[in-house]
């Protein structure tokens, strides 16, 4: 299949604002796609190379991309910067320069690029490791770009940066697959929930659609976690659900733990396997009979919950694991059961899953079941909220006891309630050198939210509220992902997501988003969130309206 067929559809989908048309265009493409290529095409349509259960990323630095472009066309650094500034997007900048500038070497291959060639070259870039890998990755990329048309070069670079910007969300891809192969979209969505692999599901939809209903969870393959919305206040829980289930909101990291016979695998929210760094947890889980998947939160704990930052020193640690296990004790609170001895439990109500969980896990030194309170009484819930804060937890989770488990979805079945000022998860798009003792540190950050067209749009600038050591560490990190320097400001790849606290949202013409945050403070860096998961302008507007109502 020619890459051109894919990029043409990409452009057409980008050009139309009609959702129906977008879906029809992609459905048509999928119908024409040979079965064995369907997974790859599905991943690439999402700006990815691998299924969601894979933690593998396409790692190529910004400077390698930049160098690759400079080595295929005659262009000065300044001209490339100017093109980049015009679009704010490297893919479109590259399309322009490859169209306008003469090539340095004529490509030896005159055949048009195929999807297969492009995909396998990108996979090679993603998986090459070891000495000299940067140079080899760059060489593969240069070859690929040299062989591609301007529109293809743009698509390739967008796939690499994951910055597709064509208003084609995952849910639309699901609808397109359902339409292409005439299968029920709900059946397809459920199949995707248990497999975390849209490519596999698309292929099955084409080949053996009847089997979609039979798909089951693969133990040891990470699932996408169910997500929570923000509750305005305690009463909201009662307004939404007649009786609500309350749990403490533990301030740590999400872990899903899979046990198959004797084998235990532990994954973070980003599908990274961290079993190796948590030997005491693995040992406790191994003692529990049965095969299962539980959902949980891990926190640093020594007599009481400790600061979240401590946890970072434990997760993903490969060396001196035992020493750090002693230094930084942790506890896991299990709050959900998703699979038990061959049965997927997504469609069982939360309360039933909780009851089963209670029969499965015997609390141990490092693994406990999260307590829950089921109540209709706001007074009782308020006491629990105060208790949570007194004990050092972050707040409460309010859950619908009748709700099903929906992997990857942020819905209103789970609500989080925190005490303090509002927070938003925003992505850093620019960083600036500070003043005085911070003159050599990148300490001022500009944050963006996502607008309705899926573009990143600035909303606030804040001095870093991080500790000195963290600022120094982040300064180095930001230098590594800098796209461009403008005076004392570095424009960076939108990778670092930060939880920003603020007192109020105001309308403002200062930023393109049309809003600004009053008294912003950085709460913490959210390494567990990707740029796809930041809060959008809809959330900003919702908080703004709510504040106006309250005021
Ligand atoms: P947030 O990350 O602020 O959107 O809040 C949701 C996160 O809270 C989940 O992804 C979990 O990592 C964490 N969490 C802590 N306690 C619980 C709980 N009892 N139930 C569900 N999630 C929890």
Image (tube, rainbow, N blue to C red):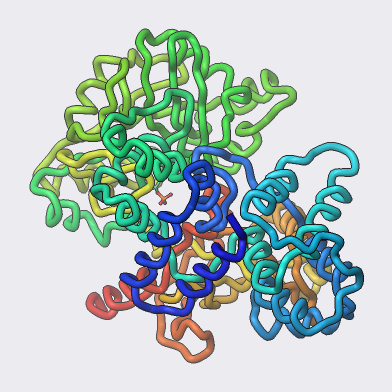
Q: Dividing the picture into quarters, in which one does residue 202 lie?
A: top left
* Residue 528 position within the rendered picture, expressed as x and y whole percent measured from the top left: 54, 47
Q: Position of residue 62 (x, y in %)?
A: 76, 62
Report the quarter where the N terminus lies: bottom right
Residue at the spot x=72%, y=79% of the render?
84
- Where is ligand 1, by quadrant? top left
Foreground: 409 or 350?
A: 409
For the residue pair 52 and 441, the one nearer the viewer reads as: 52
Q: Nearer the viewer, residue 301 or 73?
A: 73
Q: In the picture provided, is 511 more to the left or to the right than 191? A: right
Q: Residue at x 37, y 8 (%)?
A: 289
Residue 403 visible in the snapshot: yes
Looking at the image, residue 262 lies above or below residue 453: above
Please state the horizontal and vertical placement of residue 537, each as a whole percent of the image.
Answer: 41, 73
| 162 lies left or right of 347 | right
- Looking at this view, is 465 or 289 the one in front? 289
Quadrant of res 16: bottom left
The mark total stands at 0
Residue 94 location in percent, x, y?
73, 74
- Screen quadrant of the C terminus: bottom left
Residue closest to the far front:
111
Task: Evaluate whether residue 417 shows in this view.
Answer: no
Q: Which residue is at 52% across, 17% downward? A: 282
The residue positioned 81% from the left and 60% from the top of the image is 109
């Amino acid at each position: 299949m020619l890459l051109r067929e894919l990029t043409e559809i990409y452009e057409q989908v980008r050009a139309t604002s009609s959702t129906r048309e977008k879906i029809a265009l992609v459905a048509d493409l999928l119908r024409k796609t040979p079965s064995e290529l369907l997974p790859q095409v599905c991943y690439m349509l999402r700006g990815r190379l691998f299924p969601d259960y894979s933690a593998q990323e396409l790692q190529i630095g910004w400077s390698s991309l930049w160098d690759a472009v400079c080595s295929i066309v005659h262009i000065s650094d300044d001209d490339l910067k100017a093109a980049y500034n015009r679009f704010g997007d490297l893919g479109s900048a590259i399309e322009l320069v490859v169209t306008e500038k003469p090539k340095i070497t004529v490509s030896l291959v005159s055949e048009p690029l195929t999807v297969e060639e492009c995909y396998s070259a990108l996979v090679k870039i993603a998986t090459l490791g070891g000495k000299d890998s940067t140079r080899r990755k760059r060489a593969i990329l240069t070859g690929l770009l040299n062989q591609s048309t301007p529109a293809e070069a743009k698509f390739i670079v967008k796939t690499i940066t994951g910055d597709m910007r064509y208003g084609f969300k995952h849910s639309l891809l699901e609808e397109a697959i359902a339409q292409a192969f005439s299968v029920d979209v709900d059946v397809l969505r459920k199949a995707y929930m248990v497999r975390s692999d849209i490519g596999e599901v698309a292929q099955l939809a084409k080949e053996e659609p009847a089997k979609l209903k039979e798909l089951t969870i693969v133990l040891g393959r990470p699932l996408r976690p169910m997500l929570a919305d923000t509750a305005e206040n305690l009463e909201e829980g009662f307004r939404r659900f007649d009786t609500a289930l309350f749990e403490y909101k533990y301030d740590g990291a999400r872990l899903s733990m899979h046990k198959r016979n004797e084998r235990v695998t532990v994954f973070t929210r980003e599908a990274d396997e961290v079993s190796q760094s948590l030997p005491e947890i693995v040992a406790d889980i191994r003692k529990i009979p049965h095969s299962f998947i539980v959902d949980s939160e891990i926190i640093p704990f020594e007599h009481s919950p400790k600061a979240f930052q401590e946890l970072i020193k434990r997760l993903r640690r490969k060396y001196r694991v035992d020493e750090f296990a002693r230094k930084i004790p942790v506890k896991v609170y299990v709050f959900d059961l998703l699979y038990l001895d061959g049965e997927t439990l997504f469609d069982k109500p939360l309360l039933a899953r909780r009851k089963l969980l209670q029969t499965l896990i015997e609390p141990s030194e490092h693994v406990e079941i999260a307590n829950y309170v089921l109540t209709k009484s706001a007074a009782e819930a308020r006491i629990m909220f105060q208790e949570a804060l007194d004990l050092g937890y972050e707040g409460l989770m309010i859950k619908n006891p009748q709700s099903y488990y929906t992997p990857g979805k942020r819905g209103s079945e789970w609500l989080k309630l925190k005490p303090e000022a509002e927070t938003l998860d925003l992505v850093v798009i620019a960083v600036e050198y500070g003043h005085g003792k911070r003159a050599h540190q990148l300490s001022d950050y500009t944050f963006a939210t996502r607008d309705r067209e899926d573009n990143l749009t600035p909303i606030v600038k804040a001095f870093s509220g991080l500790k000195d050591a963290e600022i120094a560490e982040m300064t180095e990190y930001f230098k590594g992902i800098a796209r461009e320097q403008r005076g004392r400001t570095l424009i960076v790849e939108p990778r670092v997501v930060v939880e920003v606290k603020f007192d109020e949202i105001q309308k403002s013409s200062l930023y393109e988003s049309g809003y600004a945050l009053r008294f912003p403070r950085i709460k913490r860096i959210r390494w567990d969130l990707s740029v796809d998961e930041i809060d959008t302008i809809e959330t900003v507007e919702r908080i703004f309206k709510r504040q106006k109502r309250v005021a």
